[in-house]
Image: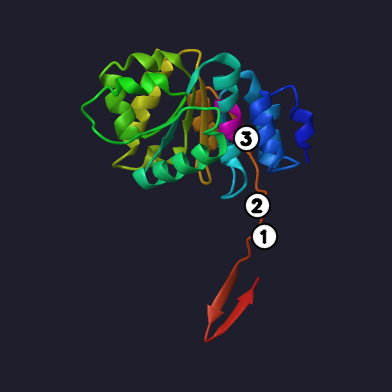
Amino acid sequence: MMKLHELKGKVPEQLYAVLDSEIKELRPAQEKAIAAGLLDGENVLVCTPTSSGKTLIAELAAVSAILGRNRKAVYIVPLKALANEKYNDFKARYGSFLKIALSIGDLDSADPYLAEYDLIITVSEKLDSLIRHYAPWISMVGVIVVDEIHLLNEPERGPTLEIIITMLKKLLKNAQIIGLSATIGNPQELADWLGAKLVVDDWRPVKLMKGIYSEGELEFY
């Protein structure tokens, strides 16, 4: 696996310091994403199992854009509960040097205060509203992270997510798009639509075992 020290000088010092306090080597998907151009602004679609390190891939791109290029980053999640979770996680890790905002409320507001923030965690419906209200800070976004991007196929939220990705691709032609998912039925087709490099890997921190439970006994196969 790729050692963390190999990123020294390739990512901002503050980001490296946070990572150095937590890990010493990267997971396979993270190494593959970097090889695919993650740190060079390439769009990347990551399809790997749960807990394989997808979020850190997004963080590498987002924090590097904020600190290295003075751009904003938007992190889109499907649920408000997940948005709150990500906000608390990112605030704990990066709150000492990044301004992090949670925007999941009033759908009839441009939330102009967000212009003062670096990393904005939101949900599809709220971001759709912000775009339609011509929030001026949108033009400063350099990285767009779409978590659980497979929900494009979901009947209720899917159309909204597809619309905002389409609008952002037109509005922010130079922005980097990072799509994350543990399950995509047509990953290459989606990667082509995003104009993204596809990163696929089956590594997981805990081995997945299959078995049958019957009459009080569990038999693995």
Q: Amino acid at mark 2?
A: Arg
Q: Amino acid at mark 3?
A: Val
Query: In this orientation, which residue lies closer to the viewer: 75 or 46?
Result: 75
Q: State the residue at coordinates (49%, 37%).
A: 91
Q: CA distance from mark 3 to mark 1?
A: 20 Å
Q: State the residue at coordinates (68%, 25%).
A: 13
Q: Label 2 belongs to which residue?
A: 204
Circles 3 and 1 in contact, beta carbons < 8 Å: no
- For the residue carrying disc 3, how many other residues have a C-alpha within 10 Å: few (<14), some (14-19), or many (20+)? many
The outermost residue toward the bottom is 215
Q: Label 1 belongs to which residue?
A: 207
Q: CA distance from mark 2 to mark 3?
A: 14 Å
Q: State the residue at coordinates (52%, 27%).
A: 98
From the top left corner, tell me how far across and down residue 53 is, in percent: 62, 43
Query: In this orientation, which residue lies closer to the viewer: 32 or 115?
Result: 115
Figure coloring: rainbow
